[in-house]
């Protein structure tokens, strides 16, 4: 709240109308900013990542620099292949599943009518960002069908579909999901380029459970 004294009113009479409106607008704008700055953001939760998730992120974080420093395309592809081989072996050793891993919901969307839902969860364990997502398949590919018998999208009427329906973007979640397999990369990853696959991996998952964290 602000007040204008009688002496100020007398002075305002001699101020051009345009300057007067600009002054009043400036005061209102500054006042609104002060209210906004007083709003406190919700504190980030203290996250205790599962050891295997920390290991997964830590090892993935070693490949981007090696890829960028490789002197030519042949060496870069060798790094790309080594990265995918390690991921495939890790996933195999852990039963193909990310069990109770933690991340933040980046996006939730549906197809027309909401028969299928799609979610992207980003985790920064070890300060290296990795995305875990449903992928965009409306119909299952041959590999997906052979592995799961269905698409990796969240189908209406399932438990995990209903779970995601109560979430919002920016919310931390705990999830359990199976890594989708891929003939070329071993573990299905949605990036188009080698560099994207190494530097900003987006793993396609078949989610079994997604719940709020903590």
Image (cartoon, grey):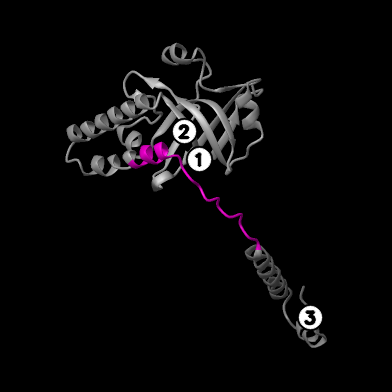
Dot 1 lies on which element?
strand
Figure quadrant of residue 146? top left
**Looking at the rendering, which quadrant does residue 57 occupy?**
top left
Q: What is the CA distance from the residue labelled 3 to the residue labelled 1?
A: 52 Å
Q: Which residue is mark 3?
A: 4
Instruction: Pinpoint residue 204: horizontal percent, then vertical percent.
Output: 45, 27
Q: CA distance from mark 3 to mark 2?
A: 57 Å
Q: Which mark is residue 132?
A: 2
Give the labeled residue for mark 1. 103
Residue 52: in magenta span: yes
Q: Secondary structure at mark 2?
A: strand
The magenta segment is 39-58
Q: Is 92 drawn above or below residue 198 in the view shown? A: above
- Decide: is 41 above or below 80: below
Q: Estimate how packed mark 3 is, as few (under 14), some (14 to 19) or many (20 or more) residues with alpha carbons within 10 Å.
A: few
Q: Residue at x 76, y 81 (%)?
A: 12
Q: How far apart are the two marked residues, 1 and 2, measured between alpha carbons?
A: 9 Å
**To which quarter of the image does residue 56 belong?**
top left
């Amino acid at each position: 709240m602000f007040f204008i004294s009688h002496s100020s009113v007398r002075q305002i009479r001699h101020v051009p109308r345009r300057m007067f409106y600009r002054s009043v607008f400036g005061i209102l704008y500054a006042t609104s900013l002060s209210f906004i700055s007083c709003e406190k953001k919700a504190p980030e939760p203290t996250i205790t990542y599962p050891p295997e998730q920390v290991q997964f992120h830590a090892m993935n974080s070693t490949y981007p620099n090696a890829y960028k420093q490789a002197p030519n395309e042949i060496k870069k592809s060798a790094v790309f292949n080594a990265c995918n081989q390690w991921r495939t072996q890790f996933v195999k050793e852990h039963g193909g599943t990310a069990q109770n891993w933690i991340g933040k919901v980046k996006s939730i969307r549906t197809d027309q009518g909401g028969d299928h839902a799609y979610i992207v969860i980003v985790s920064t364990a070890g300060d290296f960002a990795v995305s875990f997502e449903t992928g965009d398949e409306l119909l299952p590919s041959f590999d997906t069908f052979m592995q799961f018998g269905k698409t990796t999208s969240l189908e209406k009427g399932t438990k995990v579909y209903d779970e995601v329906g109560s979430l919002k973007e920016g919310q931390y979640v705990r999830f359990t999901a199976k890594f989708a397999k891929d003939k070329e990369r071993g573990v299905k990853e949605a990036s188009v380029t080698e560099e994207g696959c190494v530097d900003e991996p987006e793993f396609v998952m078949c989610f079994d459970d997604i719940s709020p964290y903590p």
